[in-house]
Amino acid sequence: MPVPLLGAVPSPPTTFDGVTEALAVLVLLVVFAMMREALLRSQVRLYAFQSLAVAALAGVLGASQHAGELYVLAGLSVALKVVLVPAVVLRLLSAAEVDLAGSHRFGVATMVLLGVVVSVIGFLTVSNIPINSSGINSLPVPALSAAAATVLVSFVLVMFRADVVSQAVGFFSMENGVSVASLVVAARMPLILEVGFLFDLLVAGVAFGVLMRAHHRRSASLSTETLDQLRG
Amino acid sequence: MQLPPAAVQALQVLVVLFMAPLVSGVIARVEARLQGRRGPRALQPYYDIAKLFRKEMLAPEGASWVFVAAPVVAFTSFLTVPLLIPVLTDFPLPLGYMGDIMGGGLILALGGFSVALAALDTGDPYAQLGSSRAMTFGALIEPSVLFVVFAVALITTTDLPYAMAAVDRSSLAQALRPAHLLAAVAFFLVVLSDTGRIPVETHTSTLEFGMIDEARTFEHSGPALALLKWGSAIKQMVLYVILVDVFCAPWGLAGSRQLGGVLLAVPVLLAKALGAGTIFAVIDNSFSKLRLYKITEFMASAFALSAVSVLVLYLGGG
Amino acid sequence: MSAVLIVIMAVPLGATVVSWWAGPRLAGLVTVLAGTATFGLAMALVPSVARYKDGTSAVGALGNWLRVDPLSLVFLLATAFLYCLTAIFSVGYVAADRAATRVYRRRLFAGLNLFAWAMAMAPMVNDLGLLWVAIEVTTVVSALLVAIEGTDGAIEAAWKYILIASLGLGLSLLATAVIYHAGSFSLGGSYDLSYTKLLGKASVFPAATVRLGYLLAVVGYGTKVGLFPVHTWLPDAHSEAPTPVSALLSGSLLATSFYAILRYYQITERAAGAAFARDVLAGFGVLTLLLGTLYLASQRDLKRLLAYSSIEHMGILAIGVSFASPLAIAGALLHVLAHAAAKGTSFFGAGSVARKLRTKDLERIRGGIGLLPWTGPMLVAGMLGLSAMPPFGTFRSELSIVAGGFAGGPGANTAEEAIAAIMVVLATLAFFGLSWHMGQSMLSPVPDSGTAVVKGETSRLMVLAMAFGLLGLVVLGVHPPAALDHLLNGAAAELGVAR
C-alpha cells in the first residue's frame, strides 16, 4: 500500500553535491563545537579538523574536475592549516602554564543560540543573491550558504570570547569559511593567487603567534580581560 | 495468510508492551558487562514488575485522585503511540492516521506531564524537584524536536512517520542527504535527553544533585509503581523505535499483512531496538554526566543541529 | 619607464634586508636613501603617466603584473613622499632615544622599509588578488611594528589591530572571490584578475553579484581605512605605535587601503551603476566624518587626537569620491597627498613634543612653542593644515570637494549638497576641536615649574623632516605643479566613467 504524500518529495542532492554539502556543513558545525569547547587545546584541534574538512573539499572538487591544481591546493592547505598553524599555537599553549581554558563573556547556550540566529541570516542572505556555480561541477550553492554561516558564526565566536587564543582560532575558522566560499565561486582561480593567499595566511598566523606570545609574556595570562586600558 | 488490519495493529501494541522490559533489562546487563561486572539477568525487569504488582499500594496523606490516576494515564498514553508509528509494517494501518509525528509527540508529552502532576500532588520535596526539572528540560528540548519534525516534513512534504521511513528506503541518496543525517543526530540527542541517559541524567542511581526523571516516582508504590516502571520502559522503546524505524534503519519492516512477514518483523524490531540500546549503553559508559547548569549547553547543541538541518534543507537545497 | 617600476619594487626590499643585517647607523642611512630614491622615482613617473588618456600611457612592467596608471600614481606618490620624510625623521628619532636597543633599532628600520615596500606595491600591482596580498602584508608588518615598544598599551593596540584588520581582510578576500565569480561568466573559468581585463568587461558583470562584492570590499577594506563602524582599532594603534610608524599608518596606510576600495568602486560603477557605488561611499563617509569629529573634541591624548583626525579625513575622502563632479574627485585625490603631508608633519611634531615632555597627555603639555622653537610652530602649522586652513594643500582639496558637491547649480542634487553642507559644518567643528587643544598645549606659556625640561630641539633631523612635510603641504596648496594637476584630472577621469 503506498504511503500518501501531499506533494512531490524534493529530490535529494546527487552524490557529489551531497558529499560536498556534508563537508561544508561539517565546517559550520565545527565552529559551533568550538563555541562549546572550553579547553584551548581542544579548540586548536577542532580547527585542525576543520581545515582537514576544507582540504577534503578541495580534494573532492579536484577529483571531480580533474584539476591537478586543486590537489596541490588541498595538499598545501593540509600542510599549512592542519599541521603548521595548530603547531604554532599549541607551542604557545604549552609555554603558557596557566589559562588552559578560555573565558566566555556569555554562557555557551546563549552563544550557540546567537550562532543559530546568525546562521539563519547567512543562509537567507545567500539564498537571496543570485549566484550560479562557476561552471559545471563546481561546489553546489548550498555549500556557499554554509560557508557564509561559518564566517558569521566565527565573528560571534571572536566577539564573545575573552582570551587571545579563542579569538585567534575564531579568526582562523573564519578564514576557513572564506576558503570554502571561494571554492564555490572561484574554484578555478589561478593557482598562484591561491598559493599567495595561503602563504599570506601563514604569515598572519605567525604574526598572531608572535603577538600572543608577547601578550603572554607581558601579562602572564592569555585572557583579554586586561586589554581594556585604551578607551574613548 | 493475510492478517486482518486490526490484528496487526494490536500485535504492534502487544509487541511493544511485552518487549519493552526486555530491552531495558538487556541494556542494563550490557552496561554492567562493559563495566566489568556480571550484571542483572536480562529478564530482571519482568520479575521486578511482577513483584511490584503483588505489593500493597500506599498513597501519601493529602494525595488526590490524580496520584492514583496518573500512572494509568501515563501507561495508556505511552501505549497509544505504537499505533501511530511504523513498528512492524512499513505502511500505515487504519488507526495510524489518528496522529502524525506531532500528535505522537503530544501524546508522549501527556504521559510525562501526568507523572509530573502526580509528583506535585504528593507534596514530597524530591518529587517536586524532579518534576520541576523534568518539565524545564522537557520544555528546553522541545524546539529541537520541533525542528526535527520540520526537517522531516520538508523532506517528505507530510509529517506522517511512515512517509519519512518510505522516503529513506527509496534510495541511498535520500538516506544520506545531509539534512537527514543532521536531523537523525539531533533526534538521537533528543532521545538521549528524553530517556534520561548520560549526559543528561544517570540512569542507574538517584543522586539528588542530578536526578530528574527518577525523582518523580518516589512516592508511588505497588501496582502504580509497576505501571510507572513499565510505562517508562515502554516510552524508551517507543523512542528507540522512532529513532530506528523512522530515521536510521527503516528496513526489515513487513511489506504487507502476510503472517510470515509480520512475524518476521518482530525479531527484527527487537534486534534493532537492542542495537540502539547497546549504543546508548556504550555512551553511558564513555561520557560523564553534565552538571545541571551545563545541560542547557547540550540542549543548545541539539537545537543547533536541528536548526542547521532545517536551514540546509529549506535554504540550502540539500 | 618600466624599469622605474622594477627599481621601485626592489629598493625598499633591499633596504629591508640591509637594515636587518647591518648596524643601526648604516640601517638609518640606507633607509633614508631608499626613501629619497623611491620618492624621486615616483616623481619621475609623473610626466609619462600624466598624459594618460583612455587606457594609454600607463606604465607597465613585468608583463603587466605591475602597472601604474594615474590613480595608482597618486597613492604611490603619497606613500613615497611620506616614506622619504619618515626615514629622515626616524633616523633622528632613534638617535635621540637613549633607551633604544640595537635590536629595537634593527627591527624598527627593517620594519619601516618592509612596511613602505608593501604600501608601495599595493598601488603598483595590476591584480585584484595581489592587491589583497599586498594589503595583508601591510597589516602583518604594521601590527608587529605597533607592538614594537612592548608596553601593555602597545600589545593591546597591536592585538586589537591585527584581529580586526585580519577579520576585515577575510571579508575582502571573500569580496575578491565574489568579483572573480562575477567575471567568470564573461571571462571564463580561469583568468587573472588584472584591472584592464576586469574593467574592460565590467559592464556585463551580473549586477547583484558585483554589489555584494563591493559591499564586502567596502566593509572589509574599510576596517583598514578606519570607516565607521569598524574603526575601533585605529585610535589605539596609531597612538601606541612609535611616531614614525604612526605617521606612516595615518598618512599612507589608510589611503592605500582606500585605494583598494577605489578599484572595486571602478568595477561596481560599470557593472551595477555609479549611483549605488557612490551612495555606499557617501553613507560610510558621512558616518565616519561624524564619528571622527565628535570624538575629536574630547581627547586627552595627543596622538589619539591625531588618530581621530585621520578618521575624520578618511570620511572626507569617501565623501569626496562619492560626489559626481570630477572637481570633487580630483579634490579627493589631492586630499590624499595633502593629508599625507599634513598628517606626517603633525605626527612628527607630536612625537617630538611627547618625547620632550615625556607625556602624551594634553592636559599636561604646556608651552610647546616655547620649549621647541622650531617644532612647536611647525606642529601648529600642521594642525592648521589638518583643519584645512589656507595656504595649505588641504584647504585646496577640501574646497574642491565642497565645490564639487555644489556643482551643477543650486538644487541640482540635493543629497550631495546636503552632504557637502554637513561636511563644512563638521570640518569647522573639527577645526574648533583641534585648535582648542593646540592652543592649550602649544600656545600657552612655558610653565615655570618645568625646569626639568630642557628647552631646545632634540634632533635636527626631526625638524628637517617636519620642514619638508610642511613645504610639500604649502606647495600643494599654493601652486601645485601643472603635471600634478594633469595627473589628478586623469585619475579623476578614471573614476568618474560610466553613469
Image (spheres, coloured by chain):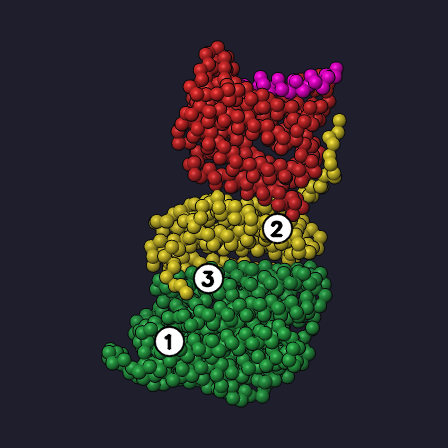
Chain colours: A yellow, B red, C green
- Find residue A126 and report its horizontal and vertical position in percent: 63, 53
Say which residue appears at 55% left-offset and 26% top-offset. Answer: B111
State the residue in front, A181 or B59: B59
Q: Nearer the viewer, mark 1 or mark 2?
A: 2
* Residue hosting label 1: C351
- Find residue C93 and report its horizontal and vertical position in percent: 36, 77
Q: Does mark 2 fall on the same chain as mark 1?
A: no
Say which residue appears at 58% left-offset and 25% top-offset. Answer: B238
The chain letter for the residue carrying disc 1 is C
Side of C12 where C449 appears, left or right = left
The secondary element bearing badge 2 is classed as helix
Looking at the image, residue C384 lies above or below residue A166: below
Q: Amino acid at mark 2?
A: Phe
* Residue hosting label 2: A123
Query: How crowded is the residue under tag 3: few (<14 C-alpha within 10 Å), some, or many (20+)?
Result: many
- Find residue B168 and report its horizontal and vertical position in percent: 67, 34
Tell me how far mark 1 sits from mark 2, CA to CA: 49 Å
* Residue hosting label 3: C162
